[in-house]
Amino acid sequence: MFDDLSKLREREPRVYGLEYLVDGLLLICRRLSLSYWIRRPFEHPLNLRQRTWVIDLYCFMELAILFGFLVWSDNRGLSTVVSGYILFEIYLSLFNIVFIGKFPKINYAPPSIERVILLMFVNVLQVIIAFAILYRSWSSSILSWPDAFSQAVRVLGTVEAPAQPRFMVDMQILLDLLLLVIFLASCVGQVGVFRRTPGTEKESQTSR
């Protein structure tokens, strides 16, 4: 963590002020992420293919866990903790891609923007299922898992905002807007890591 912070301070003089504080906070928070520790042994550019598979498998494992909790779990506390932690990992990863991904010495770039877009679609599905779990766990009325999933989809599409649980609905709307902002910033504006660079293409060829 402190090594990454020193690299950010010493080798990236263009980063200062609020951006430096945000980048530093992200570097600290990602130490709390299980996905960070799982992919860390594969951070070298020569391990690009292995790292890609590890990240993909981890994303789909999280998706399967969320679906399992949505369908079968009746433990409100455990369901809330698991869905909340996975939401934390999703947004932490997206923020790291946008803010830290432009520093190759700290965070290696993904192989292509197309792959990032595909994973972002998976992230959207994860967010929907996570909030479906929260709606089913905290709703004042009994919701079946298809009804909870449908409710989360309708909130995402701004079609309907149920009255209860109000805090969960407000949180999903804010996080959905945040997801849209990140998507536009990364794919339309092509900030940071999403710009195709010769170095990224060279790393991809080396790993084949």
Image (cartoon, rainbow, N blue to C red):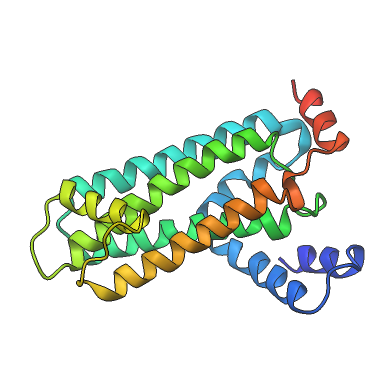
Give coordinates of residue 171: x percent, y percent: 38, 70
Give coordinates of residue 187: x percent, y percent: 65, 46
Horizontal side, residue 124 vs residue 36: left or right: left
Give coordinates of residue 44: x percent, y percent: 76, 39
189 to 24, vertically: above or below: above
Horizontal side, residue 40 vs residue 70: left or right: right
Q: Nearer the viewer, residue 137 or 141?
A: 141
Residue at position x 51%, y 57% in the image:
179
Q: Is residue 72 visible?
A: no
Q: Image quadrant of residue 173?
A: bottom left
Residue at position x 19%, y 63% in the image:
137
Q: Nearer the viewer, residue 146 or 66?
A: 146
Residue at the front extreme, as displayed: 159
Horizontal side, residue 181 vs residue 59: left or right: right
Give coordinates of residue 99: x percent, y percent: 70, 60
Q: Is residue 54 visible?
A: yes
95 to 44, vertically: above or below: below
